[in-house]
Image: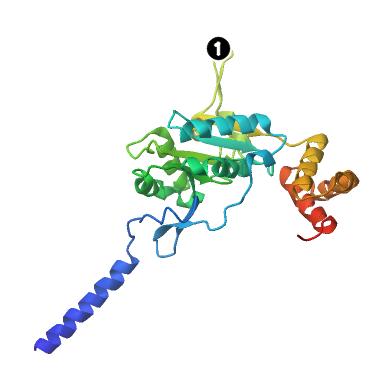
């Protein structure tokens, strides 16, 4: 009888262990000495974890050219944050490949020694922002929650979760957390022609957006600092190409010879972005420099 009872107890314990293994677990703190950047990952089991980024890109603020105005705003806001002064959540919007995410990573590298850290969160996992904030709230470091290429479709749960954090709800972000997001859409949600029909007009000529439009604008308005990026002119593109080529050790003579090739490279890709300039510089430098 006792033997049967013990077998039953063992089976029950095994069953409980299996059930516990698939239940959501509280988010645990990572090794904060492992990196200056972390990535929030959610497994198919529903368990989330903060994983250190082993190789953080070494990009510096000085590497980013032709965006001095945007750089000044982001750098100033980030420095205020690091120094414990009032600072804003930031939304960087505009043309692709113009340095939005690179600027955030450069600020991380610039101020990591002063306690700045970055946590990258995919938009699908924004519903877990309160859990992430709880883990870092008591830490002495300052954390940028980084959402890259952020945009939402109607009804996505991450939209309301982010809006709640930015709006200062009961689960608001702690003083050592700011949201830094990049997007190609200024209002983060798709906009449709039919929504223009919801605008109303007053007798004195004022125009007021309808509820649908107001809802789409409301999220981006909750970011305290908006920074817009624009497509580069040909001269700006060439200046960026030259800067990257110099950083790869290409001579001034070879840089001058690369001018026309870099324009063809951009034409083939249909873009004169900073990303395209960097990609050309890597290709050209690989052909015109010798290995160290």
From the viewer's perspective, is 289 left or right of 229?
A: right
- Residue 212 is left or right of residue 169, and the answer is right
Residue 71, visible in the rendered structure: yes
Whether residue 80 sits left or right of residue 62 in the image: it is left
Q: Nearer the viewer, residue 85 or 276?
A: 85
Q: Which residue is mark 1?
A: 203
- On the question of residue 220 being in view, the answer is no
Q: Which of these two is toward me, 157 or 115?
A: 115
Location of residue 231 (image quadrant): top right
Residue 167 percent location from the top left of the image: 41, 33
Q: Residue furthest front?
A: 292
Residue in the picture at 61% in, 37% down: 93
Q: Residues within 10 Å of mark 1 (few under 14, many from 20)?
A: few
Q: How many marks?
A: 1
Instruction: Where is residue 218? Give x, y as percent.
Output: 49, 32
The quarter of the image holding the N terminus is bottom left
Residue name at image x 52 percent, y 56 percent: 53
Residue 74 lies, with reference to residue 127, above or below; the image says: above
Examine the image and state in which quarter residue 150 appears: top right
The residue lying toward the viewer, choosing from 120 and 18, is 120
Q: Secondary structure at mark 1?
A: loop
């Amino acid at each position: 009888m006792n033997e049967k009872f013990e077998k039953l107890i063992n089976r029950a314990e095994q069953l409980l262990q299996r059930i516990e293994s698939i239940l959501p677990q509280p988010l645990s703190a990572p090794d904060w000495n492992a990196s200056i950047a972390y990535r929030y990952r959610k497994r198919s089991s529903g368990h989330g974890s903060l994983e250190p980024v082993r190789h953080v890109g070494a990009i510096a603020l000085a590497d980013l050219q032709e965006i001095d105005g945007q750089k000044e705003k982001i750098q100033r806001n980030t420095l205020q944050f690091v120094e414990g002064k009032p600072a804003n959540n930031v939304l960087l919007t505009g043309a692709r490949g113009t340095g939005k995410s690179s600027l955030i990573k450069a600020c991380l590298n610039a101020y990591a020694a002063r306690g700045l850290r970055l946590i990258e969160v995919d938009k699908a996992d924004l519903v877990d922002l309160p859990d992430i904030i709880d883990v870092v709230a008591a830490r002495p470091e300052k954390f940028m929650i980084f959402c890259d290429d952020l945009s939402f479709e109607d009804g996505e749960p991450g939209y309301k979760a982010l809006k709640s954090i930015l709006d200062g709800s009961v689960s608001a972000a702690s003083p050592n957390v700011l949201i830094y997001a990049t997007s190609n859409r200024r209002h983060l949600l798709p906009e449709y022609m039919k929504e223009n029909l919801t605008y109303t007009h007053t007798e004195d000529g004022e125009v007021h957006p309808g509820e649908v439009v107001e809802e789409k604008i409301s999220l981006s308005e909750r970011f305290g600092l908006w920074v817009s990026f624009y497509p580069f002119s040909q001269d700006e593109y060439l200046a960026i190409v030259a800067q990257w080529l110099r950083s790869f050790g290409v001579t001034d003579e070879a840089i001058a010879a690369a001018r026309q090739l870099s324009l063809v490279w951009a034409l083939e890709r249909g873009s004169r972005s900073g990303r395209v300039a960097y990609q050309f510089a890597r290709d050209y430098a690989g052909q015109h420099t010798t290995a160290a």
